Amino acid sequence: MKILKTITVALILSFSVVNAQESLDFSGKKELVSPEVKGSSITFRLKAPEAKSVKLMGNWLPPKGWEPGTVDLQKKEGGVWEITQDNLQQDLYTYSFIVDGVKVDDPNNVYLVRDIANVMNMVYIDGPKSENYKVQNVPHGTVSKRWYPSKGLKTDRRITIYTPPGYENSKEKLPVLYLLHGVGGDEEAWMTLGRASQILDNLIAQGKAKPMIVVMTNGHTSNAAAPGESAKGFYKPVMMTPDVFNADMETYFKEIIDFTESNYRVKTDVNSRAIGGLSMGGFHSLYISANYPKTFGYVGLFSPAVMPPQNATSEIYKNLDEKLKAQLNNQFKLYWIGIGKDDFLYKNVADFRQKLDGMNFKYQYVESAGGHTWSNWRVYLNDFLPLLFK
């Protein structure tokens, strides 16, 4: 009887282990290391013995027109393809493999991130320039996923809200930054791709940024939330949703401010509110702040789209010069613009700056290397935050 019980227990345990660990490999095969980081170099490896070609697609590689840059891996012993990339800057990078024309993730790297509908691996080069992108041994803020009611859009919508370390145990009122994403993004983009919570935690711990609440919105009003996080279900996100340039985001933005100020301990004077965003989020920040000129004391435009298309009909986009003059007359604290020299929006921003210069509209301007990239937008956020609420 004891033997039967022992066998039964062993079978149950064996069945449980196999099913609980079904994705694990117990064969004892030597694991492939990829990516392997040594200083400023990264070696990438992929075992694909039957493949005819393997390419590496990385966001640091020079693009080919509108196509991402790629470089060929070399086939080594045992069907392992390999390449080393040297002299990389301190940053957070994304990459994928292309095997015989098919994009695949690195099976040896569990760190993945999504940008619109593209899922990519992440790899990190450590150093002073990128140290704020890491989780450091400092006090951490709280990141919440909240839903706010939108009467204008007739639905509940999801936002991401960062509260700084110690918020829950304090009675202090704090300033607020409304941080907006680019086209195709959602309320998760600044947290995942932008490393916003890590940058905030580290800057606050260093005493370089004021403790603040940061509200990260979903700027695509035809989506209530990020893919898979709403009743819309599982769907493939697209870049140009029907709401782009229809002015719904700008028109109903006050609902987000009202929700924040009703549910969080925040200061409500103009100089305790900031708005900023990248690309489409910069476009939204420009027009929201221009249409509500007494609302924001700080405005940040990161590689912003500037002018709406000619067929945009909303009053939100009309009489911009007059609205900018009203904004100027209200004496905001900071109007900040940053863009890369190789950004495809560079000329548009240059034309916008010329307009501002002709109006004696004061702003701070930062011109960096590179193009329309998260590498730049993380830097801009890191530089913008210490300027707020002084």
Image: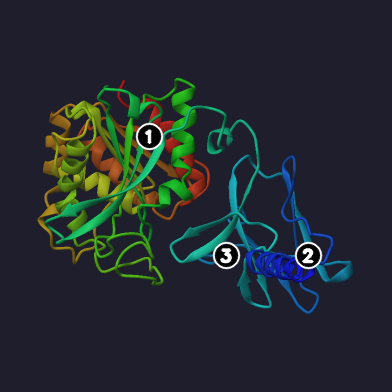
Marks 3,1: beta carbons within 8 A? no
What amino acid is found at the position of numbered circle 2 in the picture? Phe
Quadrant hosting residue 210: top left
Q: Residue at x 54, y 38 (%)?
A: 133
344 or 82, nearer to the observer: 82
What amino acid is found at the position of numbered circle 3 in the picture? Lys
Count of marks overlaid on the render: 3
In the visual, does 209 lie left or right of 257? right
Percent coordinates x, y for residue 309 in the rendering: 24, 62
Q: Above or below — where is 239 with respect to 215? A: below
Percent coordinates x, y for residue 358 in the rendering: 22, 37
Q: Residue at x 76, y 71 (%)?
A: 4
Q: Name the residue carrying label 1.
A: 365
Secondary element under disc 2, as helix, strand or loop, is loop
Mark 3 → mark 1, Cα distance in angstroms: 29 Å
What amino acid is found at the position of numbered circle 1 in the picture? Tyr
Percent coordinates x, y for residue 252 in the rendering: 15, 52
For residue 64, which numbered disc appears in the image? Answer: 3
Q: Name the residue carrying label 2.
A: 26
In the visual, does 294 lie left or right of 266? left
Q: Above or below — where is 271 with respect to 69? A: above
Q: Earlier in the sequence, mark 2 or mark 3?
A: 2
Mark 1 → mark 2, Cα distance in angstroms: 56 Å
Q: Quadrant of the C terminus?
A: top left
